[in-house]
Image (cartoon, helix red, strand yellow):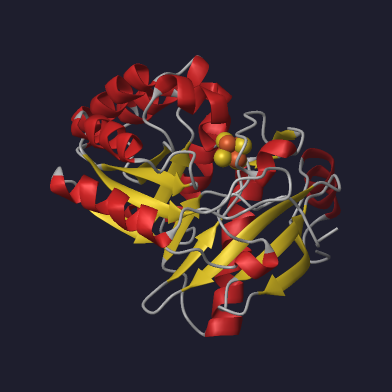
Amino acid sequence: MSNIPIEIREKLSNDFELKPLKILNSFKSADGTIKVAFELWDGNIVEGVLIPSADRITACVSSQVGCSLNCSFCATGYLPYKRNLDAGEIFDQVYLLKKLALEKNNINLSNIVFMGMGEPLLNYSNLLKSIEHITSPVGLAISPQRITVSTSGIAKMIKKLGDDNVKFNLALSLHYADNDKRTSIMPINESNNLEMLAEALEYFYSKTKTRVTLEYCMISEINDTEQDALNLANFARKVKCKINLIEYNPIDNALYKPSTNIATQNFIKILEQKKHIVNLRRSRGKDINAACGQLANKLLK
Ligand code: SF4
């Protein structure tokens, strides 16, 4: 910037750092989903995904390098946790995916989900700061109603979201509505059990009046029995919510398989008989390991 005085240039280079994300690589799925590997200033890599559908295009972004929570069905859970992303690094993923959506699909980014690598609520202040910039009129001016933060369930931080009266949507990755079984696939449940989560979600609703989404990956003969559906129906009665069932995506590290069509339909029937709102989410980007739970920097280094 040779058009500004040398003292200011020196001050800028002494006091500030620019650490933009670089797109290291990207892969396109047969269904149009694009997985992007972002290289951070320190050489670490995180992944983001752009998911086009009939009426929208969604960016899925990461909040941490690796993850400390070791959910057994998730590829990121097998990567070591290295560090939190800063607010700028989270913002940059959205910015670059928004640019990509315009270049490749000629559509403006419509939704953002924090469902990539890491547990967003364990990086709370950077998460909120990045969303502040994403939603700001001088940032990307994206409505908070189009943003969903997904958590594996940190009760204390769910309550804090309520106290901070956030305007974005919240999703809980539930995957089991029985404490012992949930702990067996999500160790975080040991310190944040279902009773604590139900209470925290109720509190969140009382403060924000926003209904949460319960996400439930359908894993064959693991969590898709009739009893599992009844447990889920019971849990869902305790909180203002809707239920998203998600087709499970196999990963190399675990032997889990997706539920059969019959098991999934029976599961939905039981939930609907109990008067719950249920959506079934089909997987996107499976062939490039970009689907839910598959982000592990595979193919991209
Ligand atoms: S599901 Fe989320 S919290 Fe669990 S290991 Fe994967 S990234 Fe971490």
Q: State the image coordinates of residue 19 (x, y, percent, origin top left).
A: 77, 50
Q: Is residue 210 left or right of residue 158?
A: left
Occupied quadrant, residue 212: top left
Q: Quadrant of ligand 1?
A: top right
Depth check, front residue: 76 or 274: 274
Q: Is residue 57 left or right of residue 289?
A: left
- Residue at x 31% of width, y 49% of height: 267
Occupied quadrant, residue 83: top right
Give the total of numbered labels.
Answer: 0
* Rendered position, 284 above or below 297: below
Residue 261 in view: yes
Q: State the image coordinates of residue 275 (x, y, percent, origin top left).
A: 13, 46
Residue 156 in view: no
Rendered-image quadrant of the N terminus? bottom right
- Residue at x 68% of width, y 55% of height: 47
Depth check, front residue: 190 or 147: 190
- Residue at x 27% of width, y 30% of height: 235
Depth check, front residue: 199 or 141: 199
Occupied quadrant, residue 11: top right
* Rendered position, 60 above or below 128: below
Q: State the image coordinates of residue 223 (x, y, percent, origin top left).
A: 44, 39
Rendered-image quadrant of the C terminus? bottom right
- Residue at x 60% of width, y 83% of height: 104
* Rendered position, 41 above or below 180: below
